[in-house]
Amino acid sequence: MVMIRKDDENSQWRFSAADIDETIDGKSKSKAYALFESSLLNTKETGTVKGLQQIHGYLFGGLYDFAGLIRTLNIAKDGFKFALARFLPETLKRIEKMPESTFDEIAEKYVEMNAAHPFMEGNGRSARIWLDLMLKKNLSLCVDWQKIGKKDYLSAMKESLTHPGRLKTLLKGALTDKINDPDVFRKGIDQSYHYEQESDVTE
């Protein structure tokens, strides 16, 4: 639900910053549905930086002016500093060259891309689609994200920056061969966007 607050000083109704983010999130999710339901997804490069940029640009085009663009500023979250912007081009080239022929290789490539965090916003939502495309192309599998709770996923992702083992276990346990099942993808998108919602994690 989008809540609107009234500015008492000016007697005008205005959106709060959180409300605007929720609106952007809803529009981006609709684009994610459309991406999976069209043939466009099959045209995106798999396992490349360009492919990830294409996904990000599609999800956030018209919503953020940096959609699809590699960041030029440093960012951090919960005290962790992601790849420094000045080193990001070389970091991304290294990640792109990482192999992706086995589950472990694909998972490690995903972990490294998360540590790089190449965009100012929308990294997780884009990278999870990027991950599924690699799994689909190379192993004929994808992640059934419904099977991974928010609390488990977020804690495993944070831990993966130094120890990726727990994240790999979560992902491996949620693999499915239903790579063309629209219900799996649609509910997977819902779960993916749920991970990003700012709320107390009680699952």
Image (cartoon, rainbow, N blue to C red):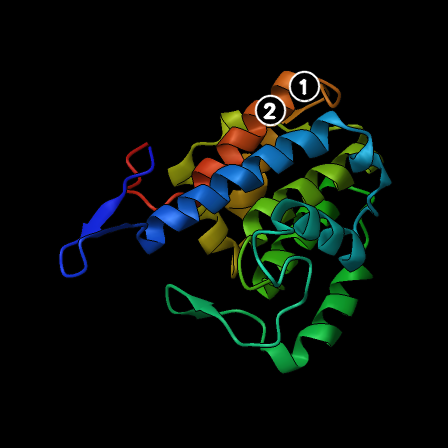
Q: Residue at x 78, y 51 (%)?
A: 51
> Tag 2: Cα neighbours inside 10 Å, few (<14), some, or many (≥20)?
some
Please name the amino acid that badge 2 sits on.
Answer: Arg
Label 1–label 2 contact, CB within 8 A: yes
Task: Quarter of the image for the C terminus: give it.
Answer: top left
Task: Give the x, y percent position of residue 178.
Answer: 71, 19
Residue 183 falls left or right of residue 46:
left
Q: Residue at x 61, y 65 (%)?
A: 116
Residue 63 falls left or right of residue 179:
left
Picture quadrant where residue 128 is located: top right
Q: Residue at x 54, y 44 (%)?
A: 167
> Depth check: 164 or 56 in front?
56
Task: Give the x, y percent position of residue 7.
Answer: 19, 55
Residue tagged by mark 2? 186
Picture quadrant where residue 72 is located: bottom right
Residue 181 falls left or right of residue 1:
right
Task: Give the x, y percent position of residue 48.
Answer: 80, 55
Assign a secondary structure to mark 1.
helix
Question: Looking at the image, is 63 positioned above or below residue 85?
Answer: above
Furthest residue toward bottom = 86
Residue tagged by mark 1? 182
Task: Give the x, y percent position of residue 25.
Answer: 48, 43
Question: Looking at the image, is 53 positioned above or below residue 142?
Answer: below
Q: Is residue 45 visible?
A: yes
Gap in angstroms between the C-alphas marked 1 and 2: 6 Å
> Depth check: 150 or 55 in front?
55
Assign a secondary structure to mark 2.
helix
Question: Looking at the image, is 150 positioned above or below residue 165?
Answer: above
Picture quadrant where residue 94 is located: bottom right
Q: Residue at x 70, y 37 (%)?
A: 132
Task: Quarter of the image for the N terminus: give it.
Answer: top left
